[in-house]
């Protein structure tokens, strides 16, 4: 059975200790955060991990369901890794993908609600109110196809043509292989995103190829596929009844996980884009 996961780290773990050809990885720590940076260098590496060529950064963090987001070191660690994939200048468009009516899928929209939008603020005004020079940031929530009749990718592409950003940050919920990854892992990648792919409902891709500018994806696992979970826990390729095959598992405390994950991702994006504003000041500015 092929395990369903959006995490490059889990794909790498499945292959064992030996580094596959065309893949390089390294681990390091920043305070309480363990960072694993995986680079898929060529087609052989892509085939080995089943992921596109690119950079995948995984930040393993304390459990969000048990720990409030009050660790500035954690926010700054994730912001630093995000910054490393972004261009130094230009407007950044932040898109929150997902459905606010489905709790495990709401992390994208909720994260964007905590991002400080500055594109409409002039340099003179920002300096007058004591914020200094702000980087231009725009944020929006595309909604879901079933409600809007418009693919999220179409919305992002259309707005990108109007806003002309230097990069897009796409935030979405992810699927993991292990329950222990839920609410404890943030993945950042420079290969963009295919909304819904983690739960078998893939939509049009949001990538540099389709949007025309670099697309950085940020996500946190909120669900595990039931077949993947059963096989991982038992170590066997168990046959899952047809009526259960499409089920997904999410933590009982998912509402707490989503609120804290959204705050963590939103604040990390803010810190990456406005490094001169402290986390405490940013939380006041966005109303946290």
Image: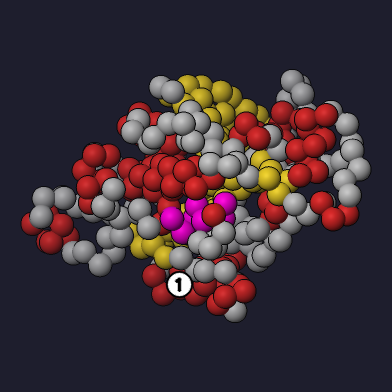
Quadrant showing the N terminus? top right
Asked if residue 259 lies in the magenta stretch, the reply is no
Relative to 265, say whether 31 is above or below: above
Residue that appears at 52% across and 72% down: 155
Residue 278: image x %, image y %? Answer: 24, 39
Residue that appears at 54% across and 54% down: 103
Residue stretch rendered in magenta on the structure:
104-110
Q: Position of 284 compared to 5: left or right?
A: left
Which residue in the rendered view is the most extreme toward the left? Answer: 128
Residue 267: image x %, image y %? Answer: 35, 44
| Colouring | secondary structure
Q: Position of 131 compared to 60: left or right?
A: left
Residue 171 shows in the view: no
- The residue carrying pointer 1 sits among few (fewer than 14), some (14 to 19) or many (20 or more) residues within 10 Å by Cα, namely some
Quarter of image, res 75: top left
Asked if residue 109 lies in the magenta stretch, the reply is yes
SS assignment for the magenta stretch, majority: helix
């Amino acid at each position: 059975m092929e395990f369903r996961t959006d995490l490059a780290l889990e794909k790498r773990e499945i292959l064992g200790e030996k580094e596959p050809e065309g893949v390089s990885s390294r681990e390091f720590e920043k305070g309480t955060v363990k960072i694993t940076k995986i680079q898929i260098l060529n087609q052989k590496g892509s085939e080995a991990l089943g992921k596109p060529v690119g950079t995948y950064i995984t930040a393993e963090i304390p459990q969000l369901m048990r720990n409030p987001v009050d660790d500035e070191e954690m926010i700054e660690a994730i912001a630093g890794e995000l910054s490393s994939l972004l261009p130094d200048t230009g407007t950044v468009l932040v898109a929150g993908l997902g459905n606010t009516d489905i709790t495990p899928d709401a992390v994208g929209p909720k994260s964007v609600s905590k991002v400080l939008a500055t594109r409409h603020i002039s340099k003179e005004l920002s300096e007058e109110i004591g914020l200094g020079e702000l980087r231009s940031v725009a944020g929006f929530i595309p909604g879901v196809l079933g409600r809007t009749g418009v693919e999220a990718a179409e919305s992002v592409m259309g707005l990108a043509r109007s806003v002309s950003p230097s990069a897009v940050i796409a935030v979405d919920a992810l699927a993991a292989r292990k329950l222990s990854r839920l609410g404890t892992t943030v993945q950042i990648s420079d290969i963009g995103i295919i909304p819904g792919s983690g739960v078998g409902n893939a939509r049009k891709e949001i990538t540099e190829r389709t949007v025309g500018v670099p697309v950085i994806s940020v996500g946190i696992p909120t669900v595990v596929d039931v077949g993947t979970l059963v096989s991982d826990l038992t170590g066997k390729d168990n046959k899952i009844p047809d009526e259960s095959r499409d089920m997904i598992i999410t933590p009982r405390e998912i509402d707490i996980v989503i609120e804290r994950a959204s705050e963590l991702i939103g604040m990390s994006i803010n810190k990456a884009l406005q490094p001169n504003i402290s986390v405490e000041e940013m939380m006041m500015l966005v109303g946290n």
